[in-house]
Amino acid sequence: MSDGKAGDELQCVAVIEALGLTPEIRRVSPRPPFVWFMPWGPISPAEAPGRPGSPIAGPFPDLVVASGRRSVAYLRAIRRHSGGRVFTVFLKDPRTGPGAADFIWAPEHDRLRGPNVLVTLTPPHRLSAERLAAARAMPPPELAALPAPRVAVLLGGDSRRHHFPPEAIATLAARLDRLAAEGAALMITPSRRTPPALAGAARDIVRRRGGYFWDGAGENPYVAMMALADAVVVTTDSMNMTGEAAATGRPVLTFSPSPDDARTRHLLDGLKALGIAHEFTGTLAGSAYPPLNSTPLIADAIMQAILQRRRARGDGPGDPQ
């Protein structure tokens, strides 16, 4: 459950899939005046459980995983109307304290702590070891044909925390060109936020130096790029992309298009301390390491919390449905 933000929804889906479950996605879209008071205020009576068209209409499931502050009030309503039968999980800091859900995951840079709060350096994501292994076993021919070293390049774009001024675009393009000139095969994927000037410069590097550039046609071979990469270049505007890069076990080369905020710096400093991340200067750096993936840790902690509550209630050790 989320308000539809791609990053929040992706994290919820990742955790649910890691539990071996198939999610039913519910999106909330609160209206004024109720949205003005979220996450602390109530939901509209018109959206109460059982009301036609409510995003939290029953029957209630055994487990709800939510993210995004607009979903906090809906999660609270589910807990109240279900009599606590539903096990609730919230990803990231709800801003209303650890009592917002039965289980909360929070990134290290947030201050939220509590007996029901799990804290990790990297966020949850869908880039599992199984998906990487499957992609590595059957890669797209155009990627398999590229010579080593192969470098996945994850290009982000303007966000709330970062922007890409012309000088940053020129610097990143020059460093990518240098890397390609030294023999690296670049596998580049832009995002929907990537500035046209940066996407155009990256496409031109591949045209001149060889490599692969995903132009938006067909399915994005993102997982295969990550599976085949000997290193990953990532722009730091997306903490999700940086976390996924750390799950490859390959050096993560980071480029900050504008000054990093405190949250991003905490993540990057943590990855650098572990020998995972290195500043991208136009050359390869670092070495392989045990992949860092918090998603299975979060999923396992949720399962253990569910089973512990069932044992405490005398419901038996059965798995959630």
Image (spheres, rainbow, N blue to C red):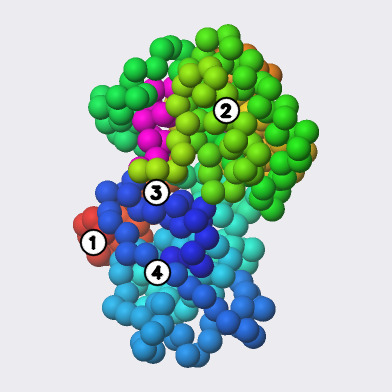
- Residue shown at the point (61%, 22%) measured from the top left: 176
- Residue shown at the point (57%, 24%) measured from the top left: 205
Residue at the far top in the pictured view: 182
Asked whether, in this view, residue 194 is left or right of residue 13, the answer is right
Labels 3, 2: front one = 2
Mark 2 vs mark 1, CA separation in Å: 50 Å
Where is the N terminus found, in terms of image quarters?
Answer: bottom left
Q: Earlier in the sequence, mark 3 or mark 1?
A: 3
Residue 19 visible to the viewer: yes
Tag on residue 14? Answer: 3
Where is the C terminus found, in terms of image quarters?
Answer: bottom left
Q: Earlier in the sequence, mark 2 or mark 1?
A: 2
Image coords of residue 319 (percent x, y): 24, 55
Image coords of residue 232 (percent x, y): 52, 25
Which amino acid, mark 2? Asp
In the picture shown, does residue 162 fall above or below 305? Answer: above
